[in-house]
Amino acid sequence: MVKHNNVVPNSHFHKNWQERVKTWFNQPARKQRRRRVRLQKARQIAPRPIAGPLRPVVRCPTFKYNTKVRAGRGFTLEELKAAGIPKRFAPTIGISVDYRRRNKSVEGLQLNVQRLKEYKSKLILFPRKMKKPKTGDSEPAALKMATQNKSAVMPIKHTVKREKARAITPKEKKHSVFAELRHARADLRLVGYRAKKAREAEEAAKEKK
């Protein structure tokens, strides 16, 4: 006898499920194939880094995540100009370029410019023709020392500055952040109204004179 408020038994056992089973017997071979492709790609692009071009440090979007940094799509034209790197030349030496991104803060701009300058100082640039090196190419001694970078180029580390514990001051106890935010919102909302009132008061004062 069926008891309680449960699902009425209605099992479907007439499907030919043996024909619909998905198997993954090719998984070990796929693993080997992916490894072979990775090694082949590394040999083809050598001595360039395996992980790809240099990426900028950017802030994550939205209020929730903007305290964290991550790798961006590419460096802005302003950052490249400040670092003294032509925008057409940058992709040829392993620097990613993003024509759409804009710099919203001086701190972010300076951080990425410093990153580009550090990259330039460490860069070993091979000449296109070994017998005819051009200005800017690395010296033969540096070329012999060059090795292929197998990890990310200048990996980004998220550092957190933690404040030491201290006593709360009387001024901080009296201060209300909620009230300050309310005042700031009110000031922003009433900018036009207050400007209009001030203008009307000036006109009235002029008329009285």
Image (cartoon, rainbow, N blue to C red):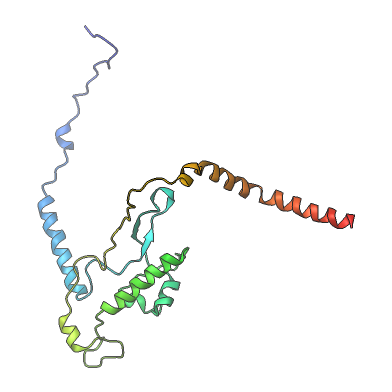
Q: Residue furthest bottom?
A: 132
* In the depicted structure, whether residue 139 falls above or below residue 186: below
In the picture, the quarter occupied by the N terminus is: top left
Q: Give me the residue at 29% from left, 91% from top.
A: 134
Answer with the quarter of the image where residue 68 lies.
bottom left
Q: Give me the residue at 19% from left, 73% from top.
A: 44
* In the depicted structure, whether residue 82 falls above or below residue 161: below
* In the depicted structure, whether residue 119 falls above or below residue 202: below
In the picture, the quarter occupied by the C terminus is: bottom right
Answer with the quarter of the image where residue 107 lies.
bottom left
The answer to whether residue 156 is visible is yes
- Position of 155 with respect to 39 (left or right) is right
Q: Nearer the viewer, residue 19 or 105?
A: 105
The answer to whether residue 75 is visible is no
Q: Give me the residue at 43% from left, 50% from top.
A: 62
Q: Nearer the viewer, residue 57 or 13?
A: 57
- Position of 34 with respect to 57 (left or right) is left
Rendering coords of residue 72 (x, y %):
36, 62
Q: Give me the residue at 59% from left, 45% from top.
A: 183
* In the depicted structure, whether residue 199 falls above or below residue 106: above
Q: Nearer the viewer, residue 174 or 191?
A: 174
Rendering coords of residue 179 (x, y %):
55, 42
Rendering coords of residue 103 (x, y %):
46, 65
